[in-house]
Image: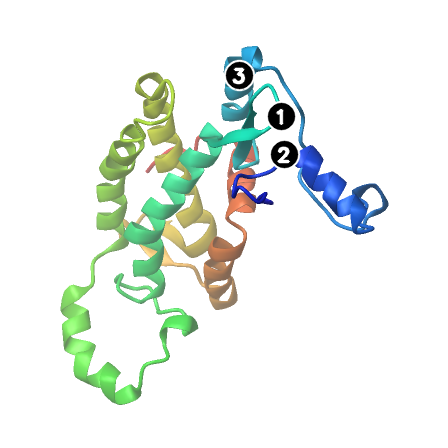
Amino acid sequence: MLQGQDALPISPKSAFDYFQSLGLKSKHGSFRHVPFTSHRIQDLKTRLQIIRSSKNNEGAVLYLFDKKGTTVGLVKVKATDYVVRRRLRESLSATLITKVFKGDVEGFPPHSIFSSSSSSSKNNNSKKNRNRKTSLDDIVKKNEKLLPLKMSRLTHVPNHKVESPKWGRYAVDFMHWWIRTRIAKYDEDKKKFVVIDDSKAYHFAYYEWKQRYGSLLEEFERAGGDVVSK
């Protein structure tokens, strides 16, 4: 965003005129930018609906102009899909991902990124850590109730009362799918989750969560997006 002398953001068109004066032309690949379009204020409601229903993007920034073409305001509009996915990521990171890869879950080794503390510190805290550990089964059961609750609190999203139950089911199904395809398998004899045998795949799962979250969701949805809970 570029600002004028009055500290107000200038319009995208004026910004591109400025870039062109510097010899920078987006058409010839001098720099990359997100697409932009112009619309009448009468179309605002329709544009908001389109932005909020869009997929695979964060949303859009709306520049509001007066009759003279001066920018009088900016409005950031988030896509509903993005808001739901972000809430899911934050919720699972806090209640599941960090606990598993820190080694705070019974039967699951810590990821190397969390193993930088000294051996003496580990020995001093080993008893305390053992007492603090919980089972993956307990985390799953808690999240089956917690995730729908967190999704129901997205009250700033339009139509949340109708849509939030669906978001909650999506969140729980994704949690089960991620556990079963990335870090664990369910032992029917022991009636509990156990860590997968492939240590490389287990450790890669942390990197994948941090760097390829969007791809994980796409894979989950291609698989049906409705994994049946145990």
Q: Distance from label 3 to label 2 (Cα)?
A: 17 Å
- The residue carrying mark 2 is 11
Label 3: state its secondary structure: helix
Query: Which kind of residue does numbered mark 3 sit on?
Result: Leu
Query: Which kind of residue does numbered mark 1 sit on?
Result: Gly
- Which residue does the image show at 61% across and 37% down from the upper left? 10
Q: Please, is residue 131 above or below residue 6 in the view?
A: below
Nearer to us in this view, 61 or 110: 61
In the rendering, at what x and y percent does residue 147 appear?
29, 37
- The residue carrying mark 3 is 44
- Which residue does the image show at 83% across and 51% down from the upper left? 23
Category of crowding for the residue at label 2, using alpha-carbon neighbours closer than 10 angstroms: few (below 14), some (14–19), many (at least 20) = some
Tell me if 217 is positioned left or right of 140 in this view: right
- Which residue does the image show at 30% across and 64% down from the upper left? 107
- Quadrant where the image shows the N terminus: top right
In the rendering, at what x and y percent does residue 191 appear?
27, 49
Tell me if 20 is positioned left or right of 209 in this view: right
- The residue carrying mark 1 is 69
Does the rendering let one see residue 35?
no
Q: Which numbered disc, 3 or 2, marks the residue that appears first in the sequence?
A: 2
